[in-house]
Amino acid sequence: MARAVPEVALQHGDERARPMPAVGMGTAEFPVVPDRVRSAVLAAIEVGYRHFRYATEAPLGEAVAEAVRRGVVASREEVFVTTKVWCTKCHPDLVLPSLQESLRNLQMEYVDLYLVHMPISLKPEASGFPLKKEDVVPFDFEGVWRAMEECHRLGLAKAIGVSNFTTKHLDKLLAEMSPVWRQRTVREYCATKGIHVTAYSPLGGQNWGGHGNDVMGSPVLAEIAEARGKSIAQVSLRWIYEQGVTPIAKSYNKERLKQNLEIFDWELTEEDHLKISQIHRRRFHLQNCFLRMVSSHQLIFRTLKLWRSRW
Ligand SMILES: NC(=O)c1ccc[n+]([C@@H]2O[C@H](COP(=O)([O-])OP(=O)(O)OC[C@H]3O[C@@H](n4cnc5c(N)ncnc54)[C@H](OP(=O)(O)O)[C@@H]3O)[C@@H](O)[C@H]2O)c1
């Protein structure tokens, strides 16, 4: 039976917006194999996930449509879908067309959350990795944010936000978060502004940089996991949830997908929290484990004034 997942109302979101489920599934894996994404998302919907962050939009949209056809969910409205505007489209005139293209790929009328991927703007024709310095152009924060607001106004994005910003930009938003990279300053800042935060790479990521994984390899988390009769992944996700943050974990494995939802009927103790707070802090990859922020467009727009002075 599908597991019920608590939901978080976005404080400044559109009143008609669907609340955000407190755990999400990340679908990124490289290289992307559309069939694998499709079947992993379908499996996730079957076990109770209703919150997805895109990897490739088309297979995500196809999986949701298939879940509706099979009656696993009644309609697309039951699912919370996030997508992002990539750096080459971070230009005021390209944000809306980029969302429209995403919606065509997803075969959806709207996304629940639309994010600016990172505070970097690249020439529209730039391609490939690593990003080239000569392709970076000044980021027009106000223009891009106005375009994001337009997406919201048109009802194509029920909520808008940013990703991979640092505290100095919202006071800089988004960074990685896990028990070993705890992001206390960002979280405290966001709490004072009523901004909801989500955490990516909550299990330490996929080791794309080959640096190992200090979350899954943590002896402190292993000890807590053993004492609670849980897995290290569950301890990490539960800790993030207890911080009031929404973890977005990726798994293509049905058993692990289930396991990652089984975090709502038990708690970490004060002693567990103390031990976690003493883990040596380590950030894995520059881009891993960033927090995501979701906020009202008004709030971020106000904050943009702050960014301008510091950018
Ligand atoms: N905005 C950004 O810049 C950015 C950057 C990075 C990530 N993200 C988003 O965040 C999502 C999650 O982050 P991530 O994929 O980097 O890392 P993650 O969720 O921390 O870790 C994923 C890895 O953990 C494994 N795993 C999942 N559940 C497990 C469990 N219960 N026990 C043991 N291993 C488990 C997965 O393998 P299996 O699939 O085999 O289970 C996978 O190798 C991504 O999919 C993406 O949507 C965004």
Image: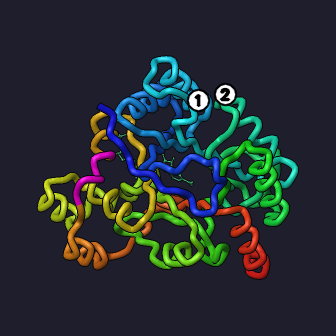
- State the mark number for residue 107: 2
Q: Is residue 124 left or right of residue 246?
A: right
- Disc 2 vs disc 1: Cβ atoms closer than 8 Å? yes
Q: Quadrant of residue 149?
A: bottom right
Quick check: is 141 in the magenta stretch?
Answer: no
Judge by depth and name the residue closer to the eye, 17 or 146: 17
- State the mark number for residue 124: none
Q: Quadrant of the N terminus?
A: top left
Q: Who's the residue at 74% across and 50% down the image?
A: 152
What is the spatial separation of the Cα atoms under label 2 and label 1, in whole angstroms? 6 Å
Q: Position of residue 164 (x, y in %)?
A: 60, 62
Quick check: is 262 in the magenta stretch?
Answer: yes
Judge by depth and name the residue closer to the eye, 11 or 104: 11
Q: Secondary structure at mark 2?
A: loop
Q: What span is in magenta? A: 261-266
Q: Who's the residue at 63% across and 62% down the image?
A: 12
> Badge 1 local density, few (<14 within 10 Å), some, or many (20+)?
many
Q: Earlier in the sequence, mark 2 or mark 1?
A: 1
In this picture, is 74 found above or below 212?
above
Q: Position of residue 18 (x, y in %)?
A: 56, 46
Q: Secondary structure at mark 1?
A: helix
Q: Quadrant of the C terminus?
A: bottom right
Q: Quadrant of residue 173?
A: bottom right
Q: Is residue 107 left or right of residue 198?
A: right
Amino acid marked by disc 1: Gly
- State the mark number for residue 61: 1
